Amino acid sequence: MTLYPQLIIDALKNVRYPGTGQDIVSAGMVEDNIRIEGMKVSFSLITEKANDPFIKSLVKMAEQAILTYVDKNIDIKGNISVKSKQKPRPELPDVLPGVKNIVAVASGKGGVGKSTVCTNLAVALANKGYKVGLLDADIFGPSVPKMLDVENEQPSLENKDGRDLIVPIENYGVKMLSIGFFVNKKEAVVWRGAMASNALKQLIIDADWGDLDYFLIDFPPGTSDIHLTLVQTLPITGAVIVSTPQEVALADARKGISMFTAEKVEVPILGLVENMAWFTPAELPENKYYLFGKEGVKKLAEQEGYALLGQIPLVQSIREGGDDGKPVALKTDSITGMAFAALADNVIDAIDKRNNELPPTHIVNVTHR
């Protein structure tokens, strides 16, 4: 039997792409490079995405179609190569080449104001002229979009260097992404751990973060799959632990510290932040009422040998700023604005000290036995 390219093409018209139902020839998935050497046939399939989930089965279907519709003796198996229109993802850990410092903002316990601190810290850093990114990694309780007044925004896609990338939303000088942009804000996110982790990886790897001086990650409370995903994906420069002064919160803060300092994780602790350190009523700005205990985080920092990066008072304007999408860090001449500006200065100093004294952090490699 004499083989020629049209026979191969006609056979491949019987193969349909599972994602659309269109045959692969009409879909432009068969490259014009069919080679025939005796009974050996080779060619390439072209996919839109580098990680097309149907491609392995598609190659097998293409092989079977040629054996069925042309000749069962054709040497085709292993001769179909795959090309992608889209460049593949960068290899770990080089996923954010333009980012100088990656900072985890974490707490062992929910309700301590971690997201409020993280958001205002990002704005305070941007106020100082730095390029800042913020990832809301709290998959099940995303709140950063509301705090930055971008709750109703919708990130767009752009093709850059052959890859389709998510464009972060920017406000107050901070680039940010959150799963909150992609889900119904009125409904709970009910996902298994693997789904949540994969979604988070997309927000990191498949986004155009560009050049950043500081990339803050608002970690979810506690210790979970999400935390493991992040330390396996990114070489985190250091962690900022947020807690309120009360003993219950401090016990969980210790767990948060131990997670980052554990063997094989070894993310340096940049320092601790005492949130809701005291209550100051607006009409009595000089008064301090220690509603949750006095200087509990300061004492913990001293005991563990970490820096106390800041003490943030419990002030009504902080809550109002978060609800209204106008972070108090924007008001640089206010008491709370100055508190976050001082926190930003201390975080910058802590990062510089860490980078001068310690080697770069490596991503966590988990081996399965």
Image: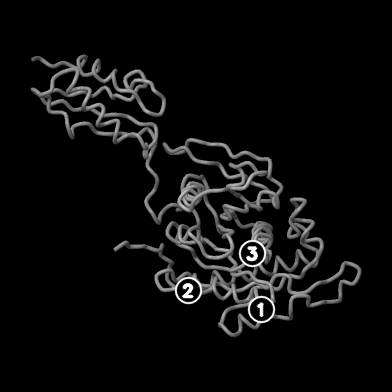
Q: Position of residue 206 (x, y in %)?
A: 47, 44
Residue at point 26% right, 31% down? 59
Who comes first in sequence, dot 3 or dot 1?
3
Vertical position of residue 222 compared to residue 46: above or below: below
Q: Residue at x 50, y 58 (%)?
A: 226
Residue at position x 71%, y 47% in the image:
149
Give whichever of discs 2 and 1 has the lower sequence position: 1
Amino acid type of the residue tagged 2 in the rendering: Thr
State the SS at label 3.
Answer: loop
User: CB under 8 Å between callouts 2 and 3?
Assistant: no
Residue picked out by circle 3: 110
* Number of numbered discs on residues: 3
Disc 2 + disc 1, Cβ < 8 Å: no
Give the side of residue 255 with respect to residue 186, left or right: left
Q: Quadrant of the N terminus?
A: top left
Q: Which residue in the protein does label 1 denote?
A: 247
Q: CA distance from mark 2 to mark 3?
A: 20 Å
Q: For mark 1, does the 10 Å Cα neighbourhood hold few (<14), some (14 to 19), or many (20 or more) residues?
A: some
Of the residues under marks 2 and 3, which one precedes in the sequence?
3
82, 333: nearer the viewer: 82
Q: Which mark is residue 261?
A: 2
